[in-house]
Image (spheres, helix red, strand yellow):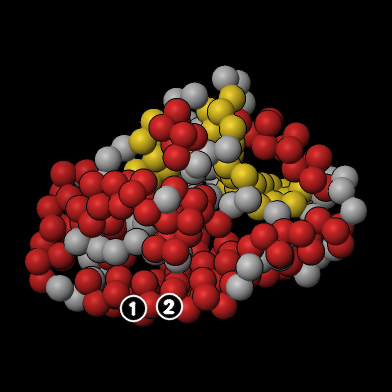
Amino acid sequence: MSFHPEPELRGHTLVITVSSHDGRPVLDRHAYASLARTFHEAAVNDDVRVVVLRGLAGCFCLGGDFSEFLDATKHQQLIAAVTDMFRMLATFPKPVLACVDGDAVGVGCTILFHCDMVIASRGSTFRVPFVDFGLVPDAATSILAPQKLGYAGAFRFFCLGDTLGVDDAKALGLVGEIVEGSAEEMALARARQLAKKPVAALLQTRGLLKGDTDVLCDRIDHEISLFQQALQDDATLKRLQRIARLAA
């Protein structure tokens, strides 16, 4: 069984690993709930000034756990956990950085739209295959993606479902910095820079830049409602079952 690192406070930077607790590079309902708790605790902990999200070695995150999509008995818990986590992330008051090394797929990519900076290694890739699965995007990316990528860029990325290399992702605005070495080392260096800033000024400036997060929370609720409806569609379930068999 793979090891899942626990959140680690390094100075004033909290490092969080995005994965399931059995060490897979996916997010299941337990991982969503754990992330929500971790962000809630970090929000009220004055020792935490910046959060850095990282994946497992060589892979940021491959998305949600398909087995939960196909098990109707888990849908209610899954939907509640996803909603809580993304609402917490959308309203989180402190800077969030991501270091991507490898693939960022599905929710492993949409989570990046809530990050203030995304730093990626040269071999990283980005893909959001929701439409191919018969699903809709999550995490309020139907608002955040057009804001960050422009409408045409967001449409191509989400509706075509093509894989973006790191250079294309940077050109569109999803990635802020590309590094030839360790993305995590660079993210931690940027986090230390931010942690040295006057706290009140940093948080107030970030809040002004982020704007009204109630709009994001409303969109998160709407997207997840459509997502849940799609999971009840027979054609979508057959498509997901076929994809799960091919991936096995």
Residue 55's tag is none
Visible in this render: residue 238? yes
Q: Residue at x 70, y 54 (%)?
A: 95
Mark 2 touches mark 1? (CB < 8 Å): yes
Q: Residue at x 30, y 71 (%)?
A: 227
Position of residue 200 relative to residue 105, above or below, is below
Visible in this render: residue 158? no
User: In this image, 233 relative to 29: left or right?
Assistant: left
Label 2 amino acid? Asp
Residue at which label 2 appears: 221
Position of residue 247 relative to residue 241, above or below, is above
Where residue 196 appears, x then y in whole percent? 88, 45
Position of residue 174 relative to residue 229, above or below, is above
User: In this image, 9 relative to 181: left or right?
Assistant: right
Residue at which label 1 appears: 225
Q: Residue at x 73, y 38 (%)?
A: 190
Label 1 amino acid? Ser
Where residue 143 appears, x then y in whole percent? 44, 64
* Residue neighbourhood size for the residue with mark 1, other residues' Cα within 10 Å, grouped as few (<14), some (14–19), many (≥20): some
